Image: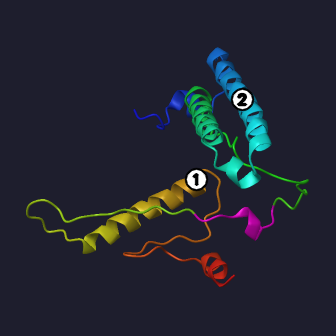
Amino acid sequence: MSEHDHDEHTHGSEPLQGVDAADLHASVDALATALHAYVQTAVGVRAEFGAHEADEDPRVLSLEAEIGGLNARLYDLLHERLGLHADLTGMSWGDDEEGDADAPPAPADVDTFHMGFVVGPQQGTSDLSLDSVLDLVDSGGADIAQRLVDAGFEVTEWGVSRGAPVLFEEDDDEEGA
């Protein structure tokens, strides 16, 4: 089982009892320590350099990489122990207004996700050609779209293409901006 597989015990519909949270707390403590070190380092670096140079300082970048790794470790622990897909690294400013739960998602509430493959010809003889890859990717896309819907997401568009990314309406709008 890979580190992101879902087993029935942690991802099932039954409540999960008896979880030892010690390593979860230890992961949070390590992350908090790294965040404190980041603040301390950033204050010191900023006292030496301008904002742009401080953003690019190797000490700051090193701590940002460490914090990213610790965030990933916490995510993995929450996922493998509790079955949670924790969104702990998103940022938000201001008060979120309560809206109509039945209303379609606002444009700011949707995002596009992309996956790409670089595929070469098969080794040896085969009845399949590179043209058949699009059918396989399309079938996989249908499976992924259905899994997203089954997980409660609204999939308003999806598509596959060969040689170029699929462009959706909002992608076209962004290019004209």
User: Which quarter of the figure has residue 45?
Assistant: top right
Which residue is more in the foreground, 27 or 51? 51
Residues in magenta? 102-112
Residue at horizontal 68 percent and vertical 51 percent from the top? 53
Q: Given the current orientation, which residue lies at the most extreme left position? A: 125
Residue at horizontal 62 percent and vertical 80 percent from the top? 175
Residue at horizontal 69 percent and vertical 81 percent from the top? 177
Q: Is residue 147 left or right of residue 105?
A: left
**Around disc 2, counting alpha carbons within 10 Å, would you say few (fewer than 14), some (14 to 19), or many (20 or more)?**
some
Q: Is residue 103 left or right of residue 20?
A: right
Residue with the mark numbered 1: 150
Q: State if disc 2 and disc 1 touch (CB < 8 Å).
A: no
Q: Main secondary structure of the magenta part?
A: loop
Q: Is residue 158 left or right of residue 170?
A: left
- Indicate the secondary structure of the residue bearing disc 1: helix
Instruction: Indicate which disc residue 37 carries.
Output: 2
Give the answer, above or below, for where 120 lies relative to 25.
below
Residue 145 locus on image (x, y percent): 52, 61
Image quarter (top left, top right, bottom left or bottom right) of the N terminus? top left
Give the answer, above or below, for where 19 lies relative to 158.
above
Is residue 65 something that shows in the picture? yes
Q: Is residue 91 left or right of residue 57?
A: right
Residue at horizontal 17 percent and vertical 62 percent from the top? 122
Magenta-drawn stretch contains 148: no
Residue 88 locus on image (x, y percent): 70, 40
Q: Amino acid at mark 2?
A: Ala
